[in-house]
Image (cartoon, grey):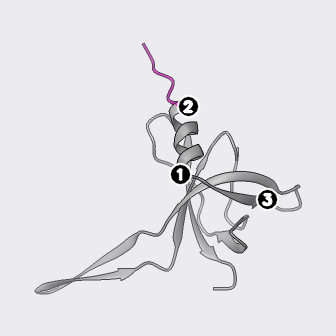
Amino acid sequence: MAVDFSPHIDTMFLIHGVYATYVHGSDDPITIKVIAYQPDEIEGVPGSITQTKASTALFDVRKSDITNPAAGDAIIMEGVEYTIIHEPVVRDADRLIWTISVVEFGS
């Protein structure tokens, strides 16, 4: 029996998500919720490990909010505009969440 995880995903975004605006080309902007994070990039140096912050951020977005995000689209969160820099990927087993790589506009 398959389990529908979408209600759990909705609850996760309700609790942890932040409102943002998604802009695709000339389409009307839509309000979405994102879970934003900025992964650290680990670089190995002989004899030690150096930890540096990556210049990109990642946004998790429900597929039910955005059907087909693309590189070049924009997400505006807390007054800051971000540009999608890679084709989004779906990493969760149930294919409910986009993971989107972004960079602050103008960076």
Residue that label 2 marks: 6
The kind of residue on which mark 3 rests is: His
Q: Residue at coordinates 68% horizontally, 69% vertically from top-left? A: 78
Residue that label 3 marks: 24
The CA span between labels 3 and 1 is 24 Å
The kind of residue on which mark 2 rests is: Ser
**Label 2 close to label 1 by CB (< 8 Å):** no
- Residue 33 got which mark? none
Q: Residue at coordinates 10% horizontally, 86% vertically from top-left? A: 47
Q: Is residue 54 above or below residue 84?
A: below
The kind of residue on which mark 1 rests is: His
**Whole-percent x, y for residue 57 in the image:** 52, 70
Which tag, 3 or 2, sits closer to the chain's start?
A: 2
Q: Residue at coordinates 65% horizontally, 52% vertically from top-left? A: 33
Quadrant in which the C terminus appears: bottom right
**Whole-percent x, y for residue 10 in the image:** 58, 38
Q: Residue at coordinates 58% horizontally, 52% vertically from top-left? A: 17
**Whole-percent x, y for residue 60 in the image:** 55, 54
| Residue at the outermost top position | 1
**Label 3 close to label 1 by CB (< 8 Å):** no
Which tag, 3 or 1, sits closer to the chain's start?
A: 1
Tell me the SS state at disc 2: helix
- Residue 16 got which mark? 1
Looking at the rendered image, the disc whose residue lies closer to the viewer, 2 or 1, is 1
Magenta-tinted stretch = 1-7
Left or right of 8: which side holds 39? left
Q: Main secondary structure of the magenta part?
A: loop
Badge 2: residue crowd in 10 Å (few <14, some 14–19, many ≥20): some
The CA span between labels 2 and 1 is 15 Å
Badge 1: residue crowd in 10 Å (few <14, some 14–19, many ≥20): few
| Residue at the outermost left position | 47
